[in-house]
Amino acid sequence: MRWTFAVLAVFGVMGSTPAGAVSLLVEGTASQQVTSLSVMAELELVKDRTFLTGCVGSTRSVPIAVTSGADPETVSLPRSTQLCLGLDQGFGDHWRVALMASGAPKVTSQVQVLDRPISLVYRSQTASAGASLGVSYDSAGLLDEVQWGVDLGVAANGFNLSHSWITAFRTYTVPSTLGSLRPSAGVLVMLGDTELQLRASYTVYSKDPLTAGAVSDAEVAKVGAVVQRFVTGAQLFGLNLDYGAYLQQTGTRLMAVDALSGLATAPVQLELRPSVQHRFTSWLKGQVGYTYDRYVPGAGHAHVASTRWTFTFGDHFQSWVAASAQWDVPVDVAPQLYGILTLGVEVSF
């Protein structure tokens, strides 16, 4: 979702380049939990009318640390890739339509739940694909003291959240999919060098996103029964197998399994974002904004304060730095504060 809106925002910046021009944007983001790098390229097919955009991004999350008693477990998460391809078309001086297709190829993660007396591996496979449509209207009054614009959009996404339990003898696969539909709206008012913007979106899911793809109680009970059976057999045959330590090891790894299953991020249901942007000089503009994210029922909410400063050097190069602080308020755990820093450059040819 964030990729789609980021690319649509680039359209307005790049529209002044000559017909046939190419623009290249590189952006890096870092926080305590995630680092990402994205590259976007745009080709102007018809001057100020038609734009073709493609993007590729790579995201890496820090390993998940699961601690239970004296047996901690750390699960490494593989790097994920995001792709997008879009077309933006202008109709006259006021209307624009944007189409975007996006996807994330399959990412596989796994945890060795048992290693003795048999091997039991949990493997999760996640992938996604989506499309979005946006329609916007701009007053286009270059000589007017007050200018304004509105936009409406809708984005649909599908997620594959399947997982498998693998032994030397068989593989038990649990298929799971999740769909989402996200209508959105925005309004922009320009007062001289100052822009006021308000955006809102609401996401509907095909099923409960907190349980989609998650390991069920029945699966946990089945694994527990297997553990109990082998422990009981070991005790009957007098093998040197410590009952408590064995259960502790399995329990910790099942916690790691739960951390890998389902969606990787908290599912947002309602998002509201007001922001203010002001151009101070021909080469400097700054923006401050606030975002309220309400997750689906049972997941809490978040407050995000952000700022972005853009520096323009001539007609073909600009760079920016952005920072945000997110106060996450889950339902069952203590609130947490996250910081995010973003650096980016754009070059037009």
Image (cartoon, grey):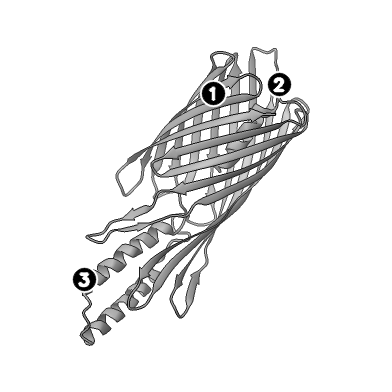
| Separation of marks 2 and 3 at Cα, in angstroms | 72 Å
Q: Which label's residue is closer to the chain start, 1 or 3?
A: 3
Secondary structure beneath dot 3 equals helix
State the residue position of label 1.
310
Residue 18: x and y, percent? Answer: 75, 26
Binning the other alpha carbons within 10 Å of mark 3 as few (below 14), some (14 to 19) or many (20 upward) gives few
In the displayed structure, 283 sits above or below 102; it is above
Identify which amino acid the numbered label 2 is placed on.
Ala
Residue 327: x and y, percent? Answer: 37, 37
Residue 114: x and y, percent? Answer: 35, 71
Q: Which label's residue is closer to the chain start, 2 or 1?
A: 2
Q: Residue furthest bottom?
A: 237
Q: Which residue is rendered at x = 70% and y = 17% of the image?
A: 141
| Residue 116 appears in view | yes
Identify which amino acid the numbered label 1 is placed on.
Thr
- Which of discs 2 and 1 lies nearer the camera? The answer is 1
Marks 2 and 3: CB-CB under 8 Å? Answer: no
State the residue position of label 2.
140
| Separation of marks 1 and 3 at Cα, in angstroms | 58 Å
State the residue position of label 3.
244
Identify which amino acid the numbered label 3 is placed on.
Gly
- Which of discs 2 and 3 lies nearer the camera? The answer is 3
Task: Say left or right for 208 vs 333.
Answer: right
Binning the other alpha carbons within 10 Å of mark 1 as few (below 14), some (14 to 19) or many (20 upward) gives some
| Separation of marks 2 and 1 at Cα, in angstroms | 23 Å
**Viewer-closest of 4 and 197:** 4
